[in-house]
Amino acid sequence: MTQSITTAVHGIGTAVPSHEVHGAFIDWASAHVADERADKMFLRMAARSGIDQRWSVLPHGDDGGSPVAPGGFYDRDPLPGTAERMAAYARYAPQLALAAIGDLASRVELGGITHLVVASCTGFVAPGIDQIIARELGLDADVERTFIGFMGCYAGITALRTGRHIVRSEPDARVLVVAVELSSLHLTPTDEIERLLAMLQFSDGAAAALLTAADAAPADAMRLGDPASLALAGGEELIQWHIGDAGFSMELSGAVPRRLHDALEDPAVRVQLIGDTPPDLYAIHPGGRSILDAVGRGLDLPEHALDDSRAVLAAFGNMSSASVLFVLARMIAERRTGSGIALAFGPGVAVEGLAFDLPR
């Protein structure tokens, strides 16, 4: 019988842009809500979002202001079209990805990369950012590349799972996994509270991880366990991501938290995603305060079980596929130990999970 190969994560690097935009967005969105009562509701919910900061790759305006300020990227009517936004993606996404890889390189040795897995759902460019990253890093021309596109927030789990499969099939592989998202490229003018609150969640960020077989990793490196996938019945309309003439439009229903809560409360779903024994650690995608609250209630978690996810949400917002890697990076930095489960949610509604272990 062939011995199963355990996959290890040597380390995780992260990066966000330097331009903080959360307060500027709230002011911009509030100005678009004509009804005073609705505006008060929006501002109240924004204050309860659990988010303190969000970041954008877009440069400061002429007066040093945000992208929605005079001279900023969005200071025009109509707003920039999809082509201009994709040009910005082609420029900034590789830069942010390389910054995360640079942070990873400050922690671990990145020589000998054999495979590159890149996840991103906020833009398209060809040649792809996987090729751009490989070229900028000076990787061998025959490095095997995989691009995971347009899957949404759970694609970070999908990328790690893909890296795990590669290592298990090729034990000598050294897999560089990257997730990079530029959500701030997709601002859409609207007076609909639900859509404004959806945009309120999202931010720009990138994360990178090195995966190898466990016997080629330090003894205290994170180990990856079994994956799990589940598409929830009846959730097709709750999270959608459409490409329009003025960027990508996110449809995020306020019913999502309840749908997740009800699913996770089902013992059969819990076993499918988590297994028979509750883990010590929960790396839950910080899709929003209400999402984390729903997961906490649905899984009946202890009070502080989601502290790492809440801390990432507060400091960075929802960075789509990169977010769950930020949570795992925080757990590593905080020297958490024990068995764990990483869960992320996205269009469908679908759930992706991956077990892990942080050795004591």
Image (spheres, grey):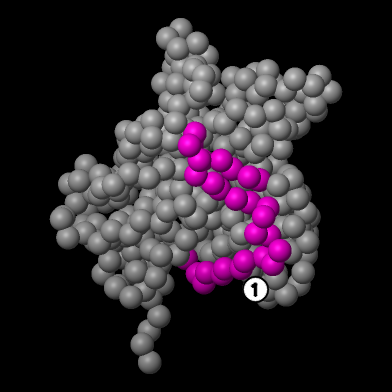
Task: Please name the residue that numbered disc 1 is placed on.
Answer: 272
Residue 212 horizontal side relative to residue 60, left or right = left
Question: Does residue 33 sit above or below 343 in this rendering?
Answer: above
Q: Residue furthest left?
A: 141
Question: Could you say where residue 315 lies in the image, as x and y percent from the top left?
Answer: 57, 33
**Residue at (51%, 19%) from the top-left corner?**
77
Q: Secondary structure at mark 1?
A: helix
Q: Position of residue 1 (x, y in %)?
A: 38, 92
Residue 8 percent across, percent down from the top left? 40, 63
Magenta region includes residue 143: no
Q: Residue furthest right?
A: 37
Position of residue 262 measured from the top left corner of the image (x, y, whole percent): 78, 61
Q: Going 29% across and 73% down the picture, which residue do you hit?
A: 170
Q: Nearer the viewer, residue 336 or 13?
A: 13
Q: Is residue 295 above or below residue 246?
A: below
Q: Residue furthest top?
A: 63
Magenta range is 223-252
Identify the image quadrant of residue 353. bottom right
Residue 312 or residue 281, whichever sits in front:
312
Q: For residue 250: magenta? A: yes
Q: Residues within 10 Å of mark 1 (few under 14, many from 20)?
A: some
Q: Amino acid at mark 1?
A: Gln
Magenta region, main secondary structure? strand
Q: Is residue 162 left or right of residue 258?
A: left
In percent of the image, x 78 and y 64: which residue is there?
265
User: In the image, is 318 to the left or to the right of 72?
Assistant: right
User: Residue at 31% of width from left, 65% of height from top?
Assistant: 216
Residue farthest bottom in this picture: 1
Q: Quadrant of residue 251?
A: top right
Residue 227 lies, with reference to residue 28, above or below; the image says: below
Q: Is residue 172 visible?
A: yes
